[in-house]
Amino acid sequence: MSVKEFNPQFMQVGVLTAALQELTPREVRDRDPDRAVEEWLEFASQLGVDNIQLSAALHPSEADVPAEALLDPVANTLDLREPFDDQRARRVRAASDASRVGLSDLAYFDNLLHHDPSARRKKHEFMLRVFDAAAILGVGAVCGFVGRNLRLSMDENLIDFEEHFVPLLQEAKARGLVYRVEQCPMPGWTVGDSFHNNIAYTPGMWVALHHICERHGVGDQFRIHYDPSHAILMGQDTRSIFQYLKDAGYNFIIGGFHVKGQVINSKGVAAWGYGGQTVNRGDWIAGLPSEDPADQANAWKKQTVLAEHELPGTARHDPLAYLQNRSVDWLDHQLAARELLELDIPNTHLVVEHEYPKARIQDKEKLKPILQGSIAFTRRIDEAAACMYALQHEVLASQGIPVQGVGREPFRS
């Protein structure tokens, strides 16, 4: 019997730059686009992260969705109105070296199956610019959505995905990139009554979409950037999802993590259920969709009436909520990832995504200690999980010593 050394493996901790959109004032970064990246890297070094997830988005002057209609402001920290070239890349690399903060990936979250052909073309062209920037920077992954064609059924969207999204994955493959899909259902993306507006919202769909990708030789390009907040929104829990993927032979499909929670409001669930508010939201006026973007933001009551996003560490420790799948059990989340998924732990990214409404402060000095605390919490939780896993599954196992107790079990509410 060989004695296994205690050697815990930790994940890399980062932050999505959308956490502070106005770090660099608009009038400054519009004139000097890469200044925003430089200043975010310097800010990130103060936050104690290993990496940033660099947010890209259509410039406000080019976006099809007004800012007033959004639940969370979109950050175009990476401004791609002009193509990203070698000169810009050298400037970003210099800032990265100076701050000792790397890039986990680039992120562009939009509806890439938009029903309007011109809008879709514009979004796809922008995504190709994101791919080009990632390739020039030597970043191996891009994170985003799939989206949904709201004029089609879910089954018809599978055909649309095969015809029009697979070519994007082929472009990613040509550049040596992986595309990681965040699974948010995006219920308030539209004033319609559809709750699932990003077809890659749940493990069953990930498998169906991956089958399509495999047929076209881009299975290795399609991965998931798992966010437990969306699982909670849909009544799921992390351990059960990871167990399902392992049972299905798909525990390789998760390639990274957003660290963001969801705190379920039991009264909201009692009133509307997990489908959210269906009438009298305020996004329809006199039987028609309102033309006022501020009214359209009320479409998000399909989500916000029953849940509120959590910045990790800001919600009370609530074991009963964990058992009811009404908040994220962060420790078990990190344990389950190690126990059930195929991961290269030291090269796996935990990206803190800040969308807790009451703490969305656009003031660097006020926001800094909030993010520092959340990031420190995230790192310590991962370290605790790593130590438990190494002790139980490696050290004790090597000496034939059983682990005590039962722990949280999958498929048990």
Image: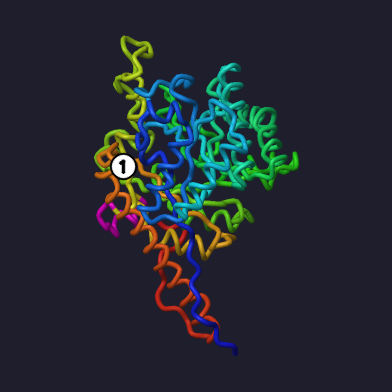
Establish if 207 lies above or below 68: below
Q: Residue at x 29, y 48 (%)?
A: 368
The image position of residue 109, as x and y in percent, is 50, 34
* Residue 192 seen in the current view: no
Q: Furthest-bottom residue in view?
A: 1
Is residue 239 shown left or right of residue 19? right
Is residue 343 shown left or right of residue 174? left
Which class describes the residues within 10 Å of circle 1: few (<14), some (14-19), or many (20+)?
many
Magenta stretch in the rendered image: 314-325
The image position of residue 156, as x and y in percent, is 62, 27
Is residue 132 shown left or right of residue 340? right
Q: Secondary structure beneath disc 1?
A: loop
Whether the magenta-drawn stretch holds residue 319 is answered as: yes
Indicate the amino acid at tag 1.
Tyr
Q: Residue at x 62, y 38 (%)?
A: 86
Q: Which residue is denoted by mark 1 in the rendering? A: 356
> Considering the image in quadrants, where does the N terminus appear?
bottom right
